[in-house]
Amino acid sequence: MVAGVLIGGALAGCGGAASAPAPLPTSTTPASAAAPPPPKKPPTMAPGPAGRTPVFERRPTAGGAAEKVVALTFDADMTADQGPRAKAGERFDNPELIALLRRLKVPSTVFMTGRWAEEYPAQAKGIGTDDLFEVANHSYSHHAFTADCYGLPVVAKDAMARDVERAFSAFREAGVRNVVPYFRFPGGCYDDAALRALTPADVTAVQWDVVSGDAFATDAGAVAAQVLDGVRPGSLVVLHCTRSAAPVTAEAVGTIVPELRKRGYRFVKVSELMEGPA
């Protein structure tokens, strides 16, 4: 968690009468408060044509050797109609995975649905106030933004931007602070009409170039192998933060992270990946 920053200095007290005044301290401001941290710069937005939401999939490679950076992203999925399943005991969270990312010190981007934030507000706030993470938008409902998307119900075109804003509102209600203006389409499904419908939301759509295959997987080794085989400098990996739908993700990450570090990779959030080569 990020500790609050102490602002202001201690006041010097007055002593009793004396023949000579005591020397004043050279500073009345604690060293830790003397230089407040600079304000965070706004996150990078991908370029795109006018009238359409831009789409980002991976860091573009420049001339010369590409920097070995990779972004691990985790979808915290929960559809708007899964409340009864959660009440019956199904777990759409994965606190063990988040704890592992903290232990391994892996900066990550969590694409969260608004419904997930409502179901797990304490966890949403914990993730969204930890500077190791940034929270991006995965819609409120986790309904599809195109037809024929893995059987998901479809959001009407005129309701798409409102669905995205409803998710941002759910984040604010839960106390999520480290929010970035990025959006991931449920199922990764989108078309030109969806990109146009989302322009009022002022977000960048974030896809990926490496599919982990962790959704409904039962073999952590196979998930890890698929990621390790697919990662290249500048890659963006999609994984999940949902125990019921991705039960072996934490185990796979426990293999992926040390191996990629051994290969010389540095982990970054999407906002840093989007900044492009230095």
Image (cartoon, rainbow, N blue to C red):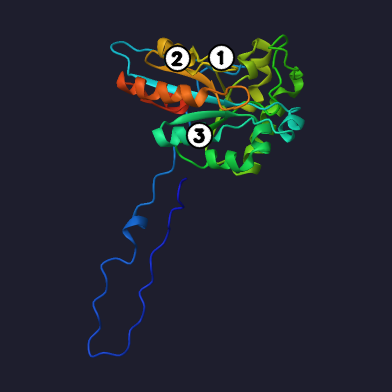
> How would you rate the neighbour count of disc 3 (Cα within 10 Å): few for under 14, some for 14-19, many for 20 or more?
many
| Lower position in the chain sequence, tag 2 or tag 3 | 3
In the rendered structure, the answer to whether residue 227 lies left or right of residue 51 reads left
Q: CA distance from mark 2 to mark 1?
A: 31 Å
Please give the label number shown on residue 98: 3
Q: Which residue is mark 1?
A: 49
Q: Residue drawn 41% across and 62% down?
A: 8
Q: CA distance from mark 1 to mark 3?
A: 36 Å
In the rendered structure, the answer to whether residue 81 lies left or right of residue 40 reads right
Can residue 276 be seen by looking at this rendering? no
Please give the label number shown on residue 227: 2
Q: Residue drawn 51% across and 31% down?
A: 97
Q: Are marks 1 and 3 in contact (CB under 8 Å)?
A: no
Disc 2 is placed on an element classified as helix
Residue 93, given in percent of the width and then of the height, sits at 60, 32
Disc 1 is placed on an element classified as loop
Q: Amino acid at mark 1?
A: Pro
Q: Nearer the viewer, mark 1 or mark 3?
A: 3
Residue 28, given in percent of the width and then of the height, sits at 33, 67
Viewer-nearest residue: 164 or 82: 82
> How would you rate the neighbour count of disc 1 (Cα within 10 Å): few for under 14, some for 14-19, many for 20 or more?
few
